[in-house]
Amino acid sequence: YYYYQTIPGINYEETMIRVHQKSLQLGLPFHYYQLDSWWYYKGIDNGVKNWTVRPDIFPSGMKHVSMELGRPL
């Protein structure tokens, strides 16, 4: 759901955390979260420029999000 679509007014980091919290409330057994091509810097023809986490996507860092979700990313 969060793929290229955040909750209006918040970033991807907080969107993922809120989606996870809601999944727990609903009893949805999420075990994985897919991080596709929206979190890293892109270069020529939208290819990978580098695998560095963009601070506008995960301001607190990917490790923080992983810890909040209780899942590896």
Image (spheres, rainbow, N blue to C red):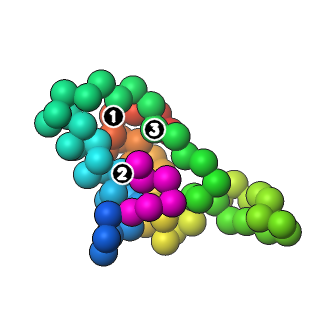
Q: Position of residue 51 (x, y in %)?
A: 69, 54
**Residue at 85 percent of width and 69 percent of height:** 44
Estimate the spatial distance between the alpha carbons at disc 1 and disc 3, rounded to whole Å: 11 Å
Q: Is residue 5 above or below residue 69?
A: below
Q: Earlier in the sequence, mark 2 or mark 3?
A: 2
Q: Is residue 30 above or below residue 66?
A: above
Dot 2 alpha-carbon crowd within 10 angstroms: few under 14, some 14 to 19, many 20 or more: many
The reply, left or right, for residue 10 in relation to residue 50 is left
- Secondary structure of the residue carrying numbered label 1: loop
Q: Quadrant of residue 5?
A: bottom left
Q: Are marks 2 and 3 in contact (CB under 8 Å)?
A: yes
Discs 1/3, front = 3
The reply, left or right, for residue 46 in relation to residue 26 is right
Q: Identify the residue under disc 1.
A: 70
Q: Position of residue 21 (x, y in %)?
A: 22, 43
Question: What stretch of residues is rendered in magenta?
Answer: 1-6
Q: Which label number is shown at residue 33?
A: 3
**Residue at 44 percent of width and 31 percent of height:** 32
- For badge 3, the amino acid type reads Tyr
Of all residues, the one furthest to the bottom in this rendering is 9
Q: Identify the residue under disc 2.
A: 16
